[in-house]
Amino acid sequence: MRVLVTGGAGFIGSHLCDFLLARGCEVLCVDNLLTGTVDNIAHIRDGRFLFIKHDVTNYIVVDGPLDYVLHVASPASPIDYLELPIQTLKVGALGTHKALGLAKARQAKFLLASTSEVYGDPLVHPQREDYWGNVNPVGPRGVYDEAKRFAEAMTMAYHRFHGVDTRIVRIFNTYGPRMRLTDGRAVPTFIRQALRNEPLTVNGDGSQTRSFTYVSDLVEGIWRLMGAPVNEPINIGNPREMTLLELAKTILRLSSSRSEIVFTPLPVDDPKVRQPDITRARQLLGWEPTVSVEDGLRETIEWYRRHGQQT
């Protein structure tokens, strides 16, 4: 199978490239390195892998046939999409359009990496795929939320109107090796602070909840979705819900840090709860997470220590 991965030098994209290569695929990795880095793919020494530096909001030109287009490209952390609002909107709209156009032209299957953020600050809990969400389109987070919601609409339009065989995965909070320690998300922020013995900064009173998925579980779920005849969105995430304060305390314990916990103001439109209903993933893909939060966090902390990224 010959697969093109947009955003392939990013955190999730690079793990996808590794996974696909291990299963015998030929991989074309396309990334403009806006938030990704060649460090994430520097370890790959495989003749079936090709890196193409390119902005996918422009036409994507590659030679040869394609079996699959995985559109993973996008800033994905609050810091990134607040600092890069226009780029975030463009990759969700123009980038999705260009990636879908390539899939249509090559008669390839297409998968969109969407997000649990399409549910916004949810009024339904846990979140099922048939929930339409509660999103502020003009708030600072709207550039990411609405970019992904538009991308989903575009993907379904190409499926219904052009007959492109599409998939949509709604990714819930994912963590693991290769996350940038400065990307602003809870797991890398807490780990960075813990390894430096600095105060862990918990937003609000820490009672807001999230559900954290280890990256290997996510990639396995995406792989299963790629091979399943499922065109409607599917949640891929860990249904274990925990508060951010609980997460901070777990990281302190696993890292043996001397840090204290301090509380900071809540960001604008920060969701109060987040938990996936993964009934469809279990039924249609036979998938559920296998890595516990404790084991995944332990692996992630040790990876940062081994790579000297605690400073």
Image (spheres, rainbow, N blue to C red):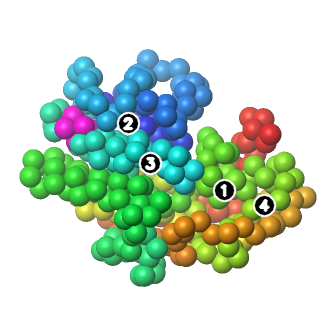
Label 4: which residue? 200
Mark 3 = which residue?
Answer: 85
First in residue order: circle 2 vs circle 3: 2
Specify the farthest residue to the front.
138
User: Which is closer to the viewer, label 2 or label 3?
Assistant: 3
The answer for how far apart the CA atoms under marks 2 and 3 are is: 19 Å
Pointer 1 or 2: first along the chain:
2
Residue 253 seen in the current view: no
Is 211 located above or below residue 15 in the figure?
below
Kindly report which numbered mark, 1 or 3, lies closer to the viewer in this rendering. Answer: 3
Magenta range: 98-102
| Picture quadrant of residue 210 | bottom right
Q: Which mark identifies residue 6?
A: 2
Q: Which mark is residue 187?
A: 1
Answer above or below: position of 86 versus 286: above
Q: Which numbered tag is attached to residue 308?
A: none
Mark pair 4, 1: CA separation: 11 Å
Q: Residue at x 75, y 69 (%)?
A: 263
As drawn, the residue found furthest toward the right would be: 258
* Residue 185 coordinates in the image, percent (x, y): 61, 55
